Amino acid sequence: MESDREHMSRRLRLFSMAEALTNTELRDAIYAEAEDADRLHRQLVAARAEAEGLAESLANSERLYTQHLNELRARTAAVADLHHPITLMGQVWCDACSVQRQTGPRTTERIAYIPHPCPTIQALDTAPPP
Protein backbone atom coordinates (compact mmCIF):
# COMPACT_ATOMS: atom_id res chain seq x y z
CA MET A 1 0.00 0.00 0.00
CA GLU A 2 1.42 3.35 -0.95
CA SER A 3 1.89 6.09 1.61
CA ASP A 4 -0.28 9.20 1.63
CA ARG A 5 2.65 11.23 0.34
CA GLU A 6 3.24 8.82 -2.56
CA HIS A 7 -0.47 8.81 -3.32
CA MET A 8 -0.66 12.61 -3.45
CA SER A 9 2.46 12.76 -5.61
CA ARG A 10 0.91 10.31 -8.07
CA ARG A 11 -2.31 12.34 -8.12
CA LEU A 12 -0.49 15.59 -8.83
CA ARG A 13 1.50 14.02 -11.65
CA LEU A 14 -1.67 12.56 -13.10
CA PHE A 15 -3.54 15.84 -13.09
CA SER A 16 -0.56 17.83 -14.35
CA MET A 17 -0.61 15.50 -17.35
CA ALA A 18 -4.38 15.88 -17.79
CA GLU A 19 -4.00 17.60 -21.15
CA ALA A 20 -2.04 14.62 -22.48
CA LEU A 21 -4.61 12.07 -21.29
CA THR A 22 -7.44 10.77 -23.36
CA ASN A 23 -11.00 11.31 -22.20
CA THR A 24 -11.18 7.66 -21.11
CA GLU A 25 -7.95 7.91 -19.10
CA LEU A 26 -9.10 11.13 -17.49
CA ARG A 27 -12.53 9.67 -16.68
CA ASP A 28 -10.87 6.56 -15.16
CA ALA A 29 -8.58 8.78 -13.07
CA ILE A 30 -11.54 10.81 -11.83
CA TYR A 31 -13.46 7.63 -10.92
CA ALA A 32 -10.41 6.31 -9.10
CA GLU A 33 -10.20 9.54 -7.12
CA ALA A 34 -13.91 9.36 -6.33
CA GLU A 35 -13.48 5.77 -5.12
CA ASP A 36 -10.57 6.88 -2.91
CA ALA A 37 -12.69 9.70 -1.53
CA ASP A 38 -15.54 7.26 -0.80
CA ARG A 39 -13.14 4.83 0.88
CA LEU A 40 -11.69 7.60 3.03
CA HIS A 41 -15.19 8.80 3.92
CA ARG A 42 -16.21 5.27 5.00
CA GLN A 43 -13.04 5.02 7.10
CA LEU A 44 -13.82 8.36 8.70
CA VAL A 45 -17.40 7.32 9.48
CA ALA A 46 -16.15 4.04 10.97
CA ALA A 47 -13.51 5.86 13.02
CA ARG A 48 -16.12 8.31 14.35
CA ALA A 49 -18.43 5.44 15.30
CA GLU A 50 -15.56 3.66 17.05
CA ALA A 51 -14.61 6.87 18.89
CA GLU A 52 -18.22 7.37 20.02
CA GLY A 53 -18.35 3.77 21.22
CA LEU A 54 -15.11 4.20 23.13
CA ALA A 55 -16.35 7.44 24.68
CA GLU A 56 -19.57 5.74 25.78
CA SER A 57 -17.61 2.80 27.18
CA LEU A 58 -15.33 5.18 29.08
CA ALA A 59 -18.30 7.06 30.51
CA ASN A 60 -19.87 3.78 31.66
CA SER A 61 -16.58 2.66 33.20
CA GLU A 62 -16.22 5.98 35.04
CA ARG A 63 -19.80 5.73 36.31
CA LEU A 64 -19.27 2.15 37.53
CA TYR A 65 -15.93 3.07 39.11
CA THR A 66 -17.48 6.02 40.95
CA GLN A 67 -20.40 3.88 42.10
CA HIS A 68 -18.04 1.13 43.32
CA LEU A 69 -15.79 3.66 45.05
CA ASN A 70 -18.77 5.21 46.85
CA GLU A 71 -19.93 1.75 47.96
CA LEU A 72 -16.47 0.94 49.31
CA ARG A 73 -16.32 4.24 51.16
CA ALA A 74 -19.74 3.58 52.72
CA ARG A 75 -18.71 0.07 53.78
CA THR A 76 -15.45 1.34 55.22
CA ALA A 77 -17.32 4.01 57.17
CA ALA A 78 -19.77 1.39 58.48
CA VAL A 79 -16.91 -0.80 59.72
CA ALA A 80 -15.19 2.20 61.31
CA ASP A 81 -18.47 3.17 63.04
CA LEU A 82 -18.85 -0.37 64.37
CA HIS A 83 -15.30 -0.37 65.76
CA HIS A 84 -15.60 2.98 67.53
CA PRO A 85 -13.53 3.73 70.62
CA ILE A 86 -14.93 3.65 74.14
CA THR A 87 -13.20 4.81 77.29
CA LEU A 88 -13.32 2.53 80.32
CA MET A 89 -11.05 2.48 83.33
CA GLY A 90 -9.13 5.44 81.90
CA GLN A 91 -8.15 3.61 78.70
CA VAL A 92 -9.48 3.54 75.16
CA TRP A 93 -10.89 0.25 73.87
CA CYS A 94 -12.62 -0.96 70.74
CA ASP A 95 -16.32 -1.38 71.41
CA ALA A 96 -16.88 -4.08 68.76
CA CYS A 97 -13.80 -6.18 69.52
CA SER A 98 -14.02 -6.08 73.31
CA VAL A 99 -15.90 -9.17 74.45
CA GLN A 100 -19.09 -8.77 76.46
CA ARG A 101 -21.22 -11.33 78.19
CA GLN A 102 -24.73 -11.05 79.41
CA THR A 103 -25.03 -11.02 83.17
CA GLY A 104 -28.76 -10.60 83.34
CA PRO A 105 -31.79 -9.88 81.22
CA ARG A 106 -30.66 -6.29 80.62
CA THR A 107 -27.08 -6.15 81.82
CA THR A 108 -23.73 -7.05 80.34
CA GLU A 109 -20.16 -6.92 81.44
CA ARG A 110 -16.96 -6.81 79.47
CA ILE A 111 -14.67 -9.76 79.99
CA ALA A 112 -11.96 -8.99 77.43
CA TYR A 113 -10.69 -5.63 76.29
CA ILE A 114 -9.12 -4.92 72.92
CA PRO A 115 -7.23 -1.63 72.67
CA HIS A 116 -8.34 0.95 70.15
CA PRO A 117 -7.29 1.27 67.39
CA CYS A 118 -8.01 -2.43 67.02
CA PRO A 119 -6.52 -4.58 64.23
CA THR A 120 -9.58 -3.90 62.08
CA ILE A 121 -9.17 -0.11 62.31
CA GLN A 122 -5.42 -0.47 61.78
CA ALA A 123 -6.12 -2.47 58.61
CA LEU A 124 -8.53 0.21 57.39
CA ASP A 125 -5.96 2.92 58.10
CA THR A 126 -3.15 1.07 56.33
CA ALA A 127 -2.65 2.15 52.73
CA PRO A 128 -2.81 -0.74 50.28
CA PRO A 129 0.38 -1.57 48.42
CA PRO A 130 0.65 0.14 45.03
Image (cartoon, rainbow, N blue to C red):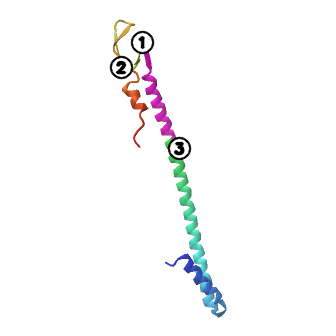
Q: CA distance from mark 1 to mark 2?
A: 14 Å
- Decide whether residue 82 is among the magenta residues: yes
Residue at the location (43% across, 31% down)? 125
Above-or-below relation of 61 to 40: above
In the structure shown, which secondary structural element does the residue marked by tag 2 occupy?
A: loop
Please provide percent x and percent y for residue 117: 41, 24
Tag in front: 1 or 3: 1
> Of circles 2 and 3, which is in front?
2
Image coordinates of residue 83 in percent, x first then y, are 42, 23
Q: For residue 95, what is the image quadrant?
A: top left
- Residue placed furthest toward the top: 104
Which quadrant: the C terminus?
A: top left
- The amino acid type, in three-letter code, at marker 2 is Ile
Magenta stretch, residue numbers: 66-89
Name the element at disc 1: loop
Residue annotated with mark 1: 90
- Residue 50 included in the magenta stretch of the image: no
Q: Is residue 69 left or right of residue 20?
A: left
Q: Earlier in the sequence, mark 1 or mark 2?
A: 1
> Residue beneath label 2, please?
114
Query: Marks 1 and 2: which is nearer the front?
Result: 1
**Which residue is depicted at the point 46% across and 27% down?**
78
Which residue position holds label 3?
Answer: 63
- Pointer 2: residues within 10 angstroms few (<14), some, or many (20+)? some
